[in-house]
Image (cartoon, grey):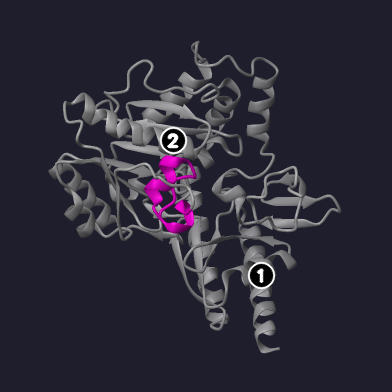
Amino acid sequence: MIPSILPTYNRAPLAFIKGEGSWLIEADGRRFLDLGAGIAVNVLGHANPDLTAALSEQAGQLWHTSNLYHIPQQTALADKLVEATFADTVFFTNSGTEAAELAIKMARKYWYEKGQPERVKIIACEGSFHGRSAGGIAAAGSEKMTKGFGPLLPGFVHVPFADIDAIAAQMDDTTAAVMIEPVLGEGGIIPIPDADLKALREHCDEHGVLLILDEVQCGVGRTGKLFAHQWAGITPDIMMVAKGIGGGFPLGAVLATENAASGMGAGTHGSTYGGNPLACAVGNAVMDIVANDEFLAEVNRKSGLFRQKLEGLITGHPDIFESVRGSGLMLGIKCKVANMDVVNAGYDNDLLTVPAADNVVRILPPLNITDTEINDAVARLDAAASQVSKGLKL
């Protein structure tokens, strides 16, 4: 008999009733150090007092009106994002998946309004993840994402991840945009080198192609800058944001230049819940904290400490680990054993990590994790690795 919850998730045997900072707590009081942060969502940890206060204050005033009316909290958050980024305009969604849908629509509508309706092709990368909607799975293209869900939304071509020459070779008079993650997330925590991002921006400019960056997982301070592309000194035309922007409350956004958004007039897109007062109250509180040079400097310091300790961990367990990679507090440990063996051993040691493709274990802690918690996390990873190693020898 099918359960009351559609069985689409392969869940860990854990259930949490409370969160405190970098910790999640089960009903029996068992405390887990959380290096997943809801898959890079809880950027300020669990039950953060600033976010709790913002949500509680707004909840006592107004929850929802729909986008039939002006929403002051939405305007305030849009203004902050425009001030802090390349963007001239923002559309709010509930998730990264919805942001991907709009990014695709925006790029194609741009060329339609320019009198070039044949420009519908979007170049995407193998191993990418852009959500599980019809548009998102077509953009990803992998059999794992698309099998059984055809016919797929047409117009996507796929090249090896971050192969800039292959991307450039696909550009022609039918190309609308390139859609890419600056740091591959689900695909295995692989950053695009700054020089390659700069070259990609140059190719897009040369061919008049829009550049869409998917910063759903790597954005909002995760890499040590507010957005990952800022390390390369480039700007996209359209950017997808979600996860961290709401600090745990469902919120996403599409940021765009005035030019890229020029085809999107009244009635071309909409959302009943997107950017409602509750979500934007929390989003404003997140931005007030994360979009701060001192906060981001701390993310960079902590990421250096964490990475250094992880390098030592890998040296100490050459039978279990191969390498560490990533950017900021978006780190991945490439495993020599099955990554789920490490994740499961972490559970036994009251530690939460997240698996990814390419046999990687993701390390995505709250951005305000403490130095003491970083030391604790590495000690628990060390114990987990020893447990896996002992199992190999039995």
- What residue is drawn where x is 43% and y is 25%? 78
Instruction: Give the residue at the far bottom of this rendering.
Output: 393
Residue 49 forms part of the magenta stretch: no
Give percent across and percent down for residue 35: 61, 57
Helix, strand or loop at label 1? It is helix
**Left or right relative to 282: residue 15:** right
What range of the chain is rendered magenta? 128-147
Residue holding disc 1: 379
- What residue is drawn where x is 86% and y is 53%? 28
* Amino acid type shown at disc 1: Ala
Disc 1 from disc 2: Cα separation: 38 Å
- What residue is drawn where x is 23% and y is 54%? 167
The one nearer the camera, 120 or 291, is: 120
Helix, strand or loop at label 2? It is helix
The one nearer the camera, 287 or 241, is: 241
Tell me if mark 2 has few (under 14), some (14-19) or many (20+) residues whose alpha carbon lies within 10 angstroms of its own: many
**Mark 1–mark 2 contact, CB under 8 Å?**
no
Residue holding disc 2: 99
Instruction: Give the residue at the far right of this rendering.
Output: 28
Image position of 279 with respect to 141: above or below: above
* Amino acid type shown at disc 2: Ala
